[in-house]
Image (cartoon, rainbow, N blue to C red):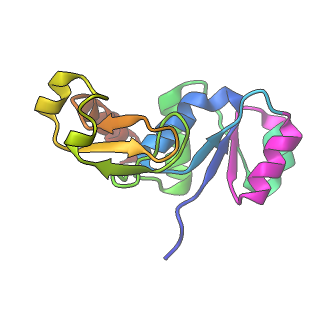
Amino acid sequence: MDEPPRFSADEMLGSLARWLRIMGYDTTYFRDRADREILEVSQKENRILLTRDRELAERCGSIGVYVRSDDLMEQLRQVSKMFCLRLDEERTRCTICNSSLEEVKPEEVIDLVPEGTLRNSDRFFQCTGCGKIYWKGSHWVDIRSKLSNICD
């Protein structure tokens, strides 16, 4: 079975990196880093480098992808089509630090989420890196809707 693609995104693509993480794809995000360092890390970690910098994409060769649009949904559409990406809710990653999420019991997050959230949600996930708590609230309807328009 093929492993899903792993991505690097330069500082011009922070929102795209966050959405790729929501979709379940391991995506590092670089801010204030030299192009040389971004390329070295991407090559070392076997990542596809996503950039709005045409020259950087060309220097990267086969691992570089020039993201054409400034519009987030168009960026998602381009990358999703190019790599046949789909939302995988079981692989969703932390939007902050890119670490994996693990399911935790509601009683473990009582003091970490708003009271109403505990009444309305029964599944919670915690980032294995930074500890952020996630749940599939009403915002997931909007996320699924946006991604279904992108990925289909």
Q: Position of residue 108 (x, y in %)?
A: 27, 41
Q: Is residue 111 left or right of residue 99?
A: left
Q: Residue at x 68, y 52 (%)?
A: 48
Q: Is residue 15 left or right of residue 60?
A: left
For the residue pair 120 and 31, the one nearer the viewer reads as 120
Which residues, given as a range, are shown in magenta?
A: 34-55
Q: Position of residue 23 (x, y in %)?
A: 42, 46
Count of numbered badges drawn on the protein: 0
Q: Is residue 114 visible?
A: yes
Outermost residue toward the bottom?
Answer: 1
Q: Residue at x 26, y 38 (%)?
A: 136
Above or below, 114 relative to 107:
above
Above or below, 20 relative to 90:
above
Above or below, 65 relative to 115:
below
- Residue 46 is one of the magenta-drawn residues: yes
- Quarter assignment of residue 91: bottom left
